[in-house]
Image (cartoon, rainbow, N blue to C red):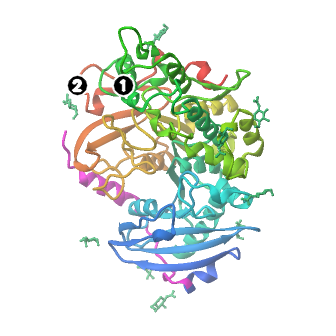
Amino acid sequence: MRTSVFTISCMILVSYIHNVAAILNCTKSAFVPHLPANATILSATVVAKNGSYGGGSQDKDFPSSATGLPALCAVQLQVYEAHSSYMVGVFLPSNATYNGRFMTTGNTGFGGGINWPALGIFVQYGFASMSTGSGHNSGAGDATWAINNTEALTDWGYRAMHGSVVVAKEVIAAYYGSSVQYSYYSACSGGGRQGLKEVQLYPEDFNGVVAGSPPWWLTHLHTWVVQIGMSNLPESGANRIPASMFLPIQNEMYRQCDPQDGLTDGVISDPYSCNFSSATLACSSTKTTSCLQPSALDTFNTLYNDWRDPSGNFLFPPFALGADYSGLAGSTSAPSGFGTDFVADMVLNDANWNWTTFNTSIVDLADKLNPGGANADDFDLSSFQSHGGKLIHYHGLGDSLIPAGSSILFREKVAEAMASSSLDDFYRMFLIPGMGHCRDSTVAPWYIAGGGQTIPDSSHSVPGFSDAQHDVVLALMAWVEKGDAPDSLIATKFLDDKVITDVVNQRPICAYPSQAQYTGSGNVNESSSWACQVGSSIIIPQARLGH
Ligand SMILES: *[C@@H]1O[C@H](CO)[C@@H](O)[C@H](O)[C@H]1NC(C)=O
Ligand SMILES: *[C@@H]1O[C@H](CO)[C@@H](O)[C@H](O)[C@H]1NC(C)=O
Ligand SMILES: *[C@@H]1O[C@H](CO)[C@@H](O)[C@H](O)[C@H]1NC(C)=O
Ligand SMILES: *[C@@H]1O[C@H](CO)[C@@H](O)[C@H](O)[C@H]1NC(C)=O
Ligand SMILES: *[C@@H]1O[C@H](CO)[C@@H](O)[C@H](O)[C@H]1NC(C)=O
Ligand SMILES: *[C@@H]1O[C@H](CO)[C@@H](O)[C@H](O)[C@H]1NC(C)=O
Ligand SMILES: *[C@@H]1O[C@H](CO)[C@@H](O)[C@H](O)[C@H]1NC(C)=O
Ligand SMILES: *[C@@H]1O[C@H](CO)[C@@H](O)[C@H](O)[C@H]1NC(C)=O
Ligand SMILES: *[C@@H]1O[C@H](CO)[C@@H](O)[C@H](O)[C@H]1NC(C)=O
């Protein structure tokens, strides 16, 4: 299936262009009279068409520049809270390309810095685009800044995002001489969590939010990572799953689970409903290599079952079958820093904390402290709903950093908290079979122009399919602006995830709880051969939902 439907993309984008003209020059002094008292301007830079802009190596989270930009004005601000401050980056596209709309994007993990690459993507759509530095400067995996720093933690948790949105809207209104028509948010991972916090705490900030793969339950996610790392230690222990078993385990999960969704195609569509027997991984008198000894098999079962405290209370859902746990297995001597750093730097304020002392009492402590107020666990989204807000939430079922089950849990908790509402009127969730953390799959179509998704040969959107069916940002806009609620999104896989003129396959990603099923006829690589269905197989076991 080859395609060259680029004319469609041009037509759609043109229809969103909005007749608003910049009234300020792109200079620091032009902005100064228009800034609120709590903000200062650090720079205003004219970027010519096809130019680039970024923070360089000083921006530890996003050292890469945005490139191939349309003509724009790049603004950097500092916004002051009572006891802290944070940087804000804004791209203001020129008159010719501005679509009259505002797009905010997010950060990643523990990181702080302005997400210039993502701003570069969103400005291509015509959005006046904003990213907050979130109040500190660090890479995604570095939480040491948080030790004894509750102000910075709170900025990272939710405060910097909201403060940046408020000031950016004012700056944008001043630059173009009129307020934005619509405000949007799109980001994945840590950015997905930030989007959910906005929906929960500041429902008036955005008309629409796309939140991908959110670590919304930080206090349980990160402690679970410590727990699963400990389960697989020490290196010499009989309980340890040898690295040589990672691939055989994957293969066995695919062998059993792939056919159960009705089509053996290298994609596990419904991992949480797979009837999987780990017994086939066990060593026996006839199978002595490429197998797990009894205590290593126990470890495997720990990784792929709910985490519970000693009293049996549910703490966190497991990896989905098919998600490879090797990335979180930790080193040969310690659990992954993704878990231990959270506990040391954000919960205990003790960089020398010895993880061997970990037990589930630390989960209780983490919940009590809720560092930075960062858990996005207020499940009553009715204020956002009554403001007319629309939420698109997605998660890759093959995510091996943040289990997709945590998103299913979030959705079910919202359903419980808002029992009287029809969630689908304002909140839809899409589980993407085979997709890893925010992006990528070797076989399954995964690309929807979501946060953190990039195709090297393309500047933005879904090349050749730049419409509300294939591009999650355009889907959100169509829902907010035209009332077209997305029943499905069509995910795309380009050749080598790169060659935009060569589509390998496309498939609908259905709004939860429905799932894409092959209709039984037609080319499996074409989305028209699939239909969204609610089948019995998609019922998620209650145990997995924390009841
Ligand atoms: C945008 O349009 C306004 C009004 O037409 C004009 O004054 C301004 O110079 C234009 N700005 C740019 C950057 O083209
Ligand atoms: C913008 O800059 C131009 C050239 O320097 C100047 O002539 C013009 O007055 C400025 N416009 C505003 C609104 O400051
Ligand atoms: C855009 O900039 C890049 C990098 O500087 C350059 O290689 C390319 O030729 C430019 N394209 C156009 C159309 O000017
Ligand atoms: C954090 O604060 C505690 C309690 O005041 C103190 O004991 C500890 O040394 C501090 N840690 C760092 C790294 O500053
Ligand atoms: C900054 O000032 C503006 C305008 O007064 C206000 O709306 C906003 O809430 C303030 N932001 C912070 C972070 O204090
Ligand atoms: C899994 O097993 C249950 C109970 O044996 C059965 O009802 C269900 O249909 C099976 N599901 C699949 C996908 O095979
Ligand atoms: C952590 O505690 C374990 C068990 O008491 C001990 O063997 C190990 O040396 C400690 N590690 C560090 C870095 O202190
Ligand atoms: C858990 O660890 C804490 C601190 O190391 C300790 O005080 C507590 O007794 C432990 N609890 C259990 C149930 O082992
Ligand atoms: C679907 O795509 C895969 C991967 O490119 C290919 O191996 C397979 O032959 C295609 N199937 C059809 C029916 O075109």
How far from the left and from the top, in percent, is residue 86?
64, 67
Disc 2 residue crowd, few under 14, some 14–19, many 20+, Cα 10 Å: few
Q: Is residue 205 magenta?
A: no
How far from the left and from the top, in percent, is residue 216?
61, 42
Tag 2 residue: 522
* Numbered badge on residue 248: 1
- Residue 365 in sight in this render: yes
User: Which residue is at 69% across, 45% downward?
Assistant: 383
Q: Please identify, in this view, whether the residue under mark 1 or under mark 2 is nearer the observer.
A: 1
Q: Quadrant of the N terminus?
A: top left
Does residue 139 appear left or right of residue 546 in this picture?
left
How far from the left and from the top, in percent, is residue 131?
54, 62
Does residue 223 appear left or right of residue 408 in this picture?
right
User: Which residue is at 57% across, 75% downward?
Assistant: 174
Callout count: 2
User: Which residue is at 57% across, 79% downward?
Assistant: 42
Quadrant housing residue 221: top right
**In the foreground, 173 or 191:** 191
| Position above or below: 160 against 214 | below
Does residue 500 appear left or right of residue 61 in this picture?
left
Disc 1 residue crowd, few under 14, some 14–19, many 20+, Cα 10 Å: some
| Position above or below: 287 against 488 | above
Does residue 232 appear left or right of residue 308 in this picture?
left
User: Bounds of the magenta span?
Assistant: 1-28
Q: Quadrant of the C terminus?
A: top right
Callout 2 amino acid: Gly
User: Which residue is at 48% across, 19% downward?
Assistant: 273
Q: Considering the numbered disc 2 on the image, is that residue within a helix, a strand or a loop?
A: loop
How far from the left and from the top, in percent, is residue 343?
67, 45
Callout 1 amino acid: Pro
